[in-house]
Image (cartoon, rainbow, N blue to C red):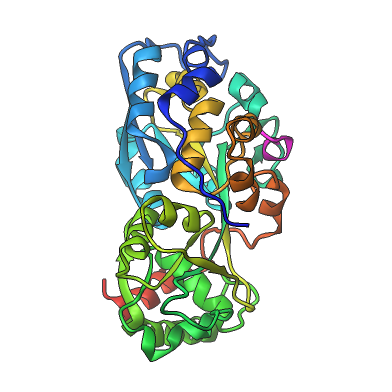
Amino acid sequence: MSITEGRLNRADFLKAGAAGALSLTLARPAFARTIRIDGTTLNMLTWSDHYANDQLKAVSKATQIQGRPTLFSDNADAYLKIKQTGSQFDIVSGDALWVPKYHKDGLTTSFPLSELTVSKQLYSIARNFPFWKDGSNYMGYPFSWSTVQIYYNPKYVTTKPDSWHALLDAKYKGKISLENIPTDVMAVAARATGAKEPYSMTTSQIASAKAFLKQLKPNVLKLASQNNEVVRALADGSAWIGITNLGTDDRVKDAGGPVVKTAYPKEGTIGFIDSEQIVKASHNQDAFVKFENAMQQAPWIAQNFITNGRPLFNEKAYKILVNGGHGDRARRQYYNKPENALKMTIKGPAGDEQAYVDAFNEVFGA
């Protein structure tokens, strides 16, 4: 069913309780060092869809903790940056199986999830991902999830592209947009070429994936640094096809663009479950709980969903969306089905990360 839905405005969120939520004050958690947190700046290595500028401003005013984001696109790049920069960053966003890699390699610190009272707003499944558990602690604060699929403009793409191989057609030259995430693009190519474990390809499978990407390259308009670039390309018509997250159809519509449709390739796809992590070398660990407790409040998360499309793990935010007349939109993007996140082939580090990156770069250029 096609419906028209507007954006939630500032008044909607104030009515939902954002102002009260942001006034919360938490006791210092047992895991953190005792330091002054008022006036702290937390450097965040993250994606553009993990925050909004007005959200950061409001949280800073309420908590005296300023979040300062630096963007990245590929988990592998973020991992390397955290490894190389020591205490330069305080918080790093991470996907799925990248989270235990950060922790195992001593780059992040786990924490008691219950120390964040906002975690009570999460779907229960998000509080129990076995791959993020560290004894009684958790390695990251659960944020959002999505499959990665094909979105297409039916005005120009007249046959539903239900296979990754459909994207190799020469008529789509320069008309496909996707994010510049080498490991995950290789994983998509792995799916296209039949590899059963897209993040653990053999040498011959990597070669097959690379060959697929060579065929795809002429059709790629641009490797986007963030998914909002894919949305813009679909909205302005410069791209006919996008490979990206759930909710892109609504975001393109909101941007004044054409109706785009969804296609799920028969070979299968990949997906992400992302989080916010504490950088172990950070000198501001004590501020993490207070900051995230304000950032993750349901009114902000509901607004994030309307802006960025894909489902998040905050159940209270889903109720706000339903009460605000956006229930159909949320259900269409599986917001109320967080269990679907565990049915995906989730993102993670490649078995031979360098081989994946080298193959990607040999196609698209370093």
> Is 260 in front, or is 188?
260
Quadrant in the picture for residue 36: top left
Residue 335 appears in the picture as rendered: yes
Q: Position of residue 365 (x, y in %)?
A: 27, 75
Name above or below for residue 226 compared with residue 171.
Answer: above
Horizontal side, residue 123 vs residue 21: left or right? right
Name above or below for residue 30 compared with residue 43.
Answer: above
Name above or below for residue 316 compared with residue 164.
Answer: above
126 part of magenta stretch:
yes
Horizontal side, residue 24 vs residue 51: left or right? right
> Is 231 in front, or is 74?
231
Name above or below for residue 117 compared with residue 26.
Answer: below
Quadrant of the image containing the N terminus:
bottom right
Residue 73 appears in the picture as rendered: no
Quadrant in the picture for residue 322: top right
Residue at 46% across, 63% down: 259
Q: Position of residue 188 (x, y in %)?
A: 52, 72
What secondary structure prevails in the magenta region? helix
The tally of labels here is 0
21 part of magenta stretch:
no
Q: Position of residue 286 (x, y in %)?
A: 45, 18
Horizontal side, residue 329 vs residue 186: left or right? right
Q: Residue furthest left?
A: 366
Residue at 61% across, 39% down: 313
What residue range appears in magenta? 122-127
Residue at 48% across, 46% down: 94
Quadrant in the picture for residue 121: top right
Quadrant of the image containing the C terminus:
bottom left
Q: Position of residue 122 (x, y in %)?
A: 65, 32
> Is 79 in front, or is 214?
214
